[in-house]
Amino acid sequence: MTDAVTALLVVLPAEQQQTLALLATLPPAEREAMAWNLDGFNHEETAKVLGRNPAAVRQAH
């Protein structure tokens, strides 16, 4: 190991790799809303955190 930067390699299961690849194809607002949803937040919680209208977040899912 060197003093500089130590790289951390994370190997994701195929399903998680596919999910990340699909998320990357979404527009930024939809990607953000979906990421919160995948982390277990509902529409209202996501809207509050993102400072958006719950209806707009619901539409982005």
Image (tube, rainbow, N blue to C red):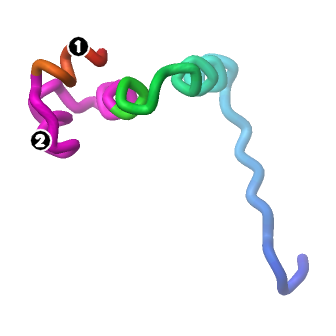
Horizontal and vertical percent position of residue 22:
57, 17
Name the residue rendered at 63%, 23% in the picture: 21
Q: Residue 25 appears in which quarter of the rendering?
A: top right
Q: Nearer the viewer, residue 26 or 19?
A: 26
Query: Going from the N terminus, do you reach mark 2 or mark 1 first?
Result: 2
Name the residue rendered at 46%, 24% in the picture: 27
Name the residue rendered at 11%, 41% in the picture: 48
User: Visible in this render: residue 39?
Assistant: no
Q: Nearer the viewer, residue 52 or 10?
A: 52
Left or right: where does residue 29 sit relative to residue 17? left
Left or right: where does residue 18 sit relative to residue 1? left
Furthest-right residue in this view: 1
Q: Residues within 10 Å of mark 1 (few under 14, many from 20)?
A: few
Which residue does the numbered mark 1 point to in the structure image? 59
Q: Is residue 48 magenta?
A: yes
User: Would you place residue 12 above or below residue 26 in this image?
Assistant: below
Left or right: where does residue 45 sit relative to residue 3? left
Q: Is residue 12 magenta?
A: no
Horizontal and vertical percent position of residue 13:
67, 25
Amino acid type for the residue under numbered disc 2: Lys
**What is the secondary structure assignment of the residue under circle 2?**
helix
Which residue does the numbered mark 2 point to in the structure image? 48
